[in-house]
Amino acid sequence: MYGRSQSRSTGLFLILCASMLLLAMLSEQSWAAPARGAAKSALAPFESAMTQVAGDVDRVTAVFGDVATLRAENQRLKAADEALRRQVVELNAAAKENATLRQALDFERSFGHRMVAAQVVGRGPDGFSRTLQIDRGTADGVRPGMIVTTGAGLVGRVREAGPHGSIVQTLGDPQSRVNVFLSKSGLQGTVTGGPSALQLEVGHSLGIAPSSGEWALTSGVGGGYPRGLVVGELASVTPRPSSTTDQALIAWVNDPAAISLVLVITDFVPS
């Protein structure tokens, strides 16, 4: 039975092949031209529709390709913009650091004292203590009591010193005291720290009064600080005629929140 079924299948296949060959031969005969034309006419709309569909598919594919290209380009431009912004920030930070270093170096040359440069690595745990932590200590020659400054002016003094780090008590600390004189009037007084601003108790004399805009510099009186360090500028003065002193506010030349580099004066011993 299996042999007869296989014979029938083979015979059917041969018949189909012969029919297709005969059809192809007949379609090439001249008398079959009308039939071929009719078939082409009947299939023309279908062929046109298929051509249009193929064109639409190509256009849609091109649009998707353009969107993907634009998205990739946008991502590339965004990454390039972020890289440029990062470079600008880094360059600005480097420029600021270089300016601070140049200012500190110029101050060291002009002031004439031996100094150790230190980076600020921390700040006091609260706004009341107003302390700074620096990365220099006893191994670098830093000792408690030494004066700390920047190229702009006085910062404070070393309160504690470890082998490789120290705590600086800034002028903003309420326990801080420094004797000063005013650059224009020559009047002398004492600057104390506070939670919001430096305060000055300045003596007045007949015909001489402090005025806003004068610079307050360390006087050296009492031996606690070397003479000539800039403390700040008089921001306002409150006259007190019934007292021997006037009260003033000092705009400190240093902002503890912005200080990144300090100089520790190592060859001045407070008396």
Image (tube, helix red, strand yellow):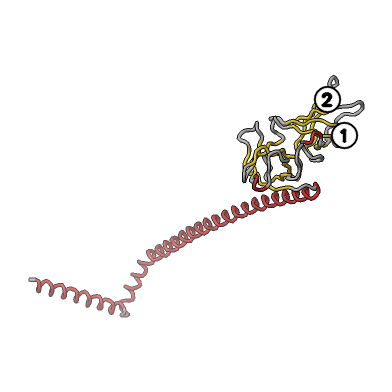
**Residue sitting at 66 percent across and 36 percent down?**
131
| Disc number placed over residue 245 in the picture, else none | 2
Q: Position of residue 135 (x, y in %)?
A: 63, 46
The image position of residue 92, as x and y in percent, is 68, 50
Query: Total number of numbered labels?
Result: 2
Q: Nearer the viewer, residue 35 or 146?
A: 146
Furthest residue toward top: 242
Q: Crowding near pointer 2: few (<14 within 10 Å), some, many (20+)? A: some
Q: Amino acid at mark 1?
A: Gly
Q: Describe the element under mark 1 as helix, strand or loop.
A: loop
Give how far apart the Cα atoms at labels 2 and 1 are: 14 Å
Q: What residue is rendered at 84% in x and 31% in y?
A: 188
Q: Which quadrant: the N terminus?
A: bottom left
Asked whether, in this view, residue 90 is left or right of residue 44, the answer is right
Q: Which residue is tagged 1?
A: 186
173 or 141: which is nearer to us? 141
Helix, strand or loop for disc 2: strand
The answer to whether residue 66 is left or right of residue 261 is left
Q: Residue 208 at x, y = what percent?
A: 90, 29
Outermost residue, right side: 207
Q: Is residue 271 left or right of residue 185?
A: left
The three-letter code of the residue at mark 2 reads Thr
